[in-house]
Image (spheres, rainbow, N blue to C red):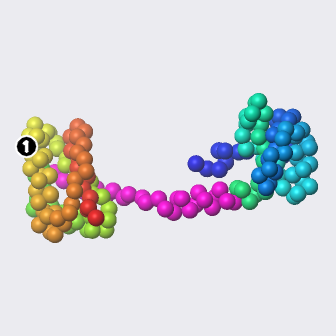
C-alpha cells in the first residue's frame, strides 16, 4: 500500500477548529484550538499531525511530531517488509498426449532443472480434437509418467499441489518438499 494513499492532514490542513493534542513526548495536552496547537508545534520546530479523525466526543486527535521523519520511517519499514517477502516463481511446461520420447525427455529435463532451482513447476497437458474424448484415461497416465520420471531422476521429495481442469487443458503443479 503506497504512502500516498494515506495522506494525514498536517498543520493548516486539519479542518477542525478544536483538536485534542498529544505532545511529542506523549503527554496529553487536552482539547485546544487548532491554531494554538500549530503554534506549540512550530515553537518546537515540529508539525501538528492529525492521527485520528475522531477521538473522544468527536474531536480529532493530533500529535506534535516531525512529519518528515515519520514519513521516512514508514517508507523504510515498508521497504524492509518488502525485502522479507518470498516470491514464488512458477514455471510451466506444456505436453501433448502423443508427444515424442525425445521431446518428452527435453521438457522433463527442463522441468527437473526448474524444480532443482527452487521453483514450482506447472505441467499442462493440452488435448485437441479426438484427444478430448480420451482425456480421462490419457491425463492420469501422463501425469503418473511425469511423476515416475521425477522419482527416477532422483527427485523423491516432489509433491503435487493441485489439479486444474479447464476446457482442453489439464494442469498440475509440482514442487520440491524441503
Dividing the picture into quarters, in which one does residue 30 lie? top right
Report the residue that reaches farthest toward the top. 57
Report x, y in % for residue 147: 15, 58
Report x, y in % for residue 53: 73, 36
What range of the chain is rendered magenta? 72-96
Count of marks placed on residues: 1
Q: Is residue 103 left or right of residue 178?
A: left
Q: Nearer the viewer, residue 50 or 171?
A: 50
Q: Residue at x 19, y 47 (%)?
A: 126
Dividing the picture into quarters, in which one does residue 52 lie? top right
Q: Residue at x 70, y 56 (%)?
A: 71
Report x, y in % for residue 74: 65, 56
Report the residue that reaches farthest toward the front. 27
Q: Is 117 colored magenta in this rendering? A: no
Q: Is residue 15 above or below residue 174?
A: above
According to the picture, the residue beneath numbered tag 1 turns out to be 137
What is the crowding at mark 1: few (fewer than 14 residues within 10 Å), some, or many (at least 20)?
Answer: few
Q: Nearer the viewer, residue 100 or 109?
A: 109
Q: Residue at x 73, y 44 (%)?
A: 51
In the rendered image, is residue 107 in sight?
A: no
Question: Secondary structure beneath disc 1?
Answer: helix
Dividing the picture into quarters, in which one does residue 50 lie? top right
In the rendered image, is residue 59 in sight?
A: yes
Q: Is residue 95 above or below residue 155?
A: above
Q: Residue at x 38, y 57 (%)?
A: 88
Report x, y in % for residue 136: 10, 40
Q: Quadrant of the C terminus?
A: bottom left
Q: Is 73 colored magenta in this rendering? A: yes
Q: Is residue 27 left or right of residue 35?
A: left
Amino acid at each position: 500500500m503506497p504512502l500516498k494513499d494515506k495522506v494525514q492532514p498536517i498543520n493548516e490542513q486539519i479542518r477542525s477548529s478544536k483538536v485534542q493534542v498529544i505532545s511529542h513526548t506523549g503527554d496529553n495536552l487536552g482539547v485546544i484550538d487548532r491554531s494554538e496547537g500549530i503554534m506549540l508545534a512550530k515553537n518546537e520546530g515540529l508539525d501538528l499531525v492529525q492521527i485520528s479523525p475522531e477521538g473522544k466526543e468527536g474531536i480529532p486527535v493530533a500529535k506534535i511530531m516531525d512529519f518528515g521523519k515519520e514519513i521516512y520511517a514508514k517508507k523504510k519499514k515498508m521497504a524492509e517488509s518488502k525485502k522479507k517477502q518470498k516470491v514464488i516463481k512458477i514455471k510451466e511446461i506444456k505436453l501433448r498426449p502423443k508427444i515424442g520420447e525425445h521431446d518428452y525427455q527435453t521438457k522433463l529435463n527442463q522441468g527437473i532443472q526448474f524444480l532443482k532451482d527452487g521453483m514450482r513447476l506447472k505441467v499442462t497437458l493440452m488435448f485437441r480434437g479426438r484427444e478430448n474424448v480420451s482425456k480421462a484415461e490419457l491425463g492420469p497416465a501422463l501425469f503418473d509418467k511425469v511423476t515416475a520420471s521425477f522419482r527416477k531422476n532422483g527427485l523423491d521429495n516432489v509433491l503435487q499441489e493441485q489439479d486444474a481442469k479447464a476446457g482442453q487443458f489439464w494442469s498440475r503443479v509440482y514442487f520440491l518438499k524441503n
